[in-house]
Amino acid sequence: MSAASFRRLPNLAALAFGVLPFLLAPVALATTLTAQEGVPAPPGLVPEQMWPAPTAADWQKPVLIQWQRTWDDAVRLSKETKRPILVCVNMDGEIASEHYAGIRYRDPEITRFYEPYICVIASVYRHNPRDYDDQGRRIPCPRLGDCTCGEHIAMEPIVFEKFLDGKRISPRHIMVELDGKKTYDVFYTWDTASVFKAIDDGIKNRAIQAPPIVKGDRSILEKVASADSRDRTEVEHAYTSGTAEQRRSLLQAALSLGEQAPIELLRLGAYGLDTDLNKQARQGMTKAKDPGTVDLIADTLRAPLEANERHELVEALGKFADTSMKARTFANAHRGFEQESTVINTARWQSVLEGAAYQGAYSAEDLAKKGSERDAAIAAQPRSPEARLDVAETNLLQALSTVAGTGPGGSRQAQQYRRMLFQDAERTAHSAIALGASGWRLDAILCLCARERGSIHEAYDLAISAAPNLPPEAPGQLAMEVLALFAAARQEGIVTAVREKKDFPPQWTTDVHAAYAVLERHPLGTDAHFAYHYDFLHFFGTPEADAVLDRGIERFPASPMLHERLRSRLLAQQDPAALEAEYERRVAAAGSSQSGSSPTMPWFAGYASLCAAEAHRRTHHNDLAVAAYQRGIAHFEHYQKATGNTDGVHYIAMAHAGIARTQLLAGDLNATFASLQTVFQLAPRAAASVDGLGTTAMQTAEMLRGRALTEKQDELLKKIDAAIAALPPEAHELPEYEQNSRPANRRRRG
């Protein structure tokens, strides 16, 4: 569990299925620079002074800009009110974006410039693990205001395609007129005044004069049909705080709109405690035409439902097939989950795998003995295709069981021996073909030999041929490898179909599900099989996903990839406190057991506490964050003491870096410097490591330096400069999102 294995990067998607989410929602990290390209900073100032970092008190103030929830809502309102759209782009960690999000968007003197516009916000970073609670109530983004994280994430690819000219730059402000064309596009500025002047001038110099908005005394029921986020919020509050009769009236008003039913009210109805309203809301989903209905139905399918209701919702996705690749893909996938596999007989596999006589793997002695017997057989029957397949199979099994040594590249001799065995297996299999051999065993042998050669698509095709006829009695290693390739081949087929905007047979989803179900029961199954199966089911949203992960953790309690998914699940379904409580329980259980996993569990608990701390920071609960960081440090120190391993030191340093950022926000400059010194002393390279919020200890040091300059704390400034100068070059490396955008005069000091 080295530091390199656990870089603080977003968990974007499944390892084996990771491309599909991006095909369905093509967001990407923003690369940024808030400065005029090629223009030096104003003399006597550093960026940390021009864009002061928000304090903890700043982050507690509410965002005063009213963001619209979707691009369609913004366009509809723009046409109704004759007001232009203002597109704002923001990102985490970048100094000016932090300044806008934490200070400017919360300042009434500044936000008045935004009021004449229909405003939308785009940011690819998630600040809440989920957008709705268990009862369907919205969870506003703690960084950007009343929109959810899902809404500002979904906005980014839309505005990127329409207005960003292929450049992801933040912060950015774009005025869009009623005809959909840009009036101005402000970025790369060294000051904020020019931005606000452009926003103000955009309205003052506008040829179209928007009429005043007169809403009158509309009833709450009349506001149900409104696209304005203010009205939507008011209606939803009335629903959640109203009586049972009021909720029923509001839901009926929503349902009466048919195709135009507001999906947020349908969500509240479907996730509430009234089972009758639940059913009515789900029926409303089958009629609604709002593009957000696709996500609402996808979320609803994650819960257990009666078969007929599930089927109706899946079929309702079909009406979006022409406009939404996600709807087409999810509809096909869920149709597949409703079927039994015609390729993998899971019941028969389970019966054989659980039998006392099943042998998962042969020992080296068994393989050597079998090889001698088969060599003798082929000598006696040189024209027998089956005898040749026997020899090819033995060579293949010997190759699969050969461990290529230890160390960075493994033993060269072992690698060469393994390669020769694969070559012998493939050569012998082809000689069997010349004698008339065919069938699953031939396909399976050639499949794994093709994979070894790097011909992965050839291996996929052969796995698809071999899997339907692969008997459970096949040699364990051979069967396991072929089934894993078969599952990967079907997933690749789904991804290719989505990329090419084509449909795929629902049976492919069934096949993936069935293949992984067998692999999870196979004695040679791995944690990767559980992880990929969970990713597949979780992405499409099925009730079985959590059970797969739970079984995987039970079988492989020290698997990093399974713990990564468990952390994400606990944060999404519960909260940071629940995440830490679960790992405290696991540490206690491991400590009381005699299993080999017990020494590593404090490591996982320490990492979970760091994730919990970052979740608290996202919601600006900095006291809770510091406490979680301290618990994380204690877990890593316990792990180091128990095992003697030092692979937790990097994360102890990262915890101190997180504490330093919270101290800076609180205005305690000396404490900030003390925490940074701890980072620099424990693990200097960690100074350049990006945490889960997109920030580094070096960025905190630069912000601290800016505050010391502003407050004329000369002694502190000298200490900061000396500490930074003493760091090795790798501590000065820029985050990836700055490497190609920061000009030469803004490279790290040192």
Image (tube, grey):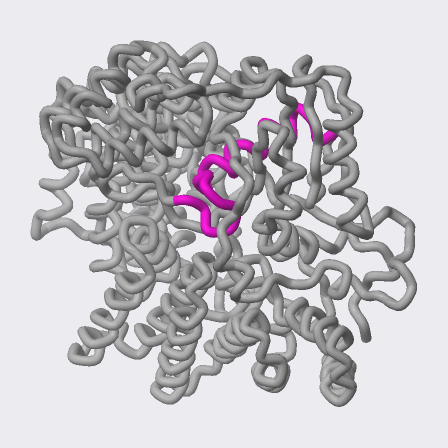
Magenta segment: 140-165
* Residue visible at 72% across and 66% down in the picture: 733
Image position, residue 127 (x, y; %): 47, 51
Residue 273, given in percent of the width and then of the height, sits at: 13, 36
Residue depicted at 10% across the width and 29% down the height? 275
Quarter of the view holding residue 372: bottom left
> Residue 135: x percent and y percent?
23, 39
| Drawn side of residue 138 relative to residue 43, left or right | left
Q: Residue 443 at what x, y percent from top left? A: 38, 30
In the image, 284 versus 750, the foreground residue is 284
Quadrant holding the N terminus: bottom left
Q: Is residue 524 left or right of residue 431?
A: left
Q: Is residue 557 left or right of residue 638?
A: left
| Position of 359 relative to 216 (above/below) | below
> Residue 256 magenta-drawn?
no
Quadrant containing the C terminus in the rendered view: bottom right
Residue at 28%, 49% in the rendered image = 573
On the image, which quarter does residue 505 sit in? top left
Residue 393 higher or lower than 269, as above or below: below
Does residue 11 appear anywhere in the picture? no
Does the magenta-highlighted stretch encompass residue 159?
Answer: yes
Task: Determine whether 134 is above or below 50 in the image.
Answer: above
Seen from the viewer's position, the closer of residues 734 and 291 is 291
Q: Residue at x 24, y 65 (%)?
A: 582
Front in this rendered view, residue 684 or 406:
684
Asked whether residue 651 appears in the rendered view, the answer is: yes
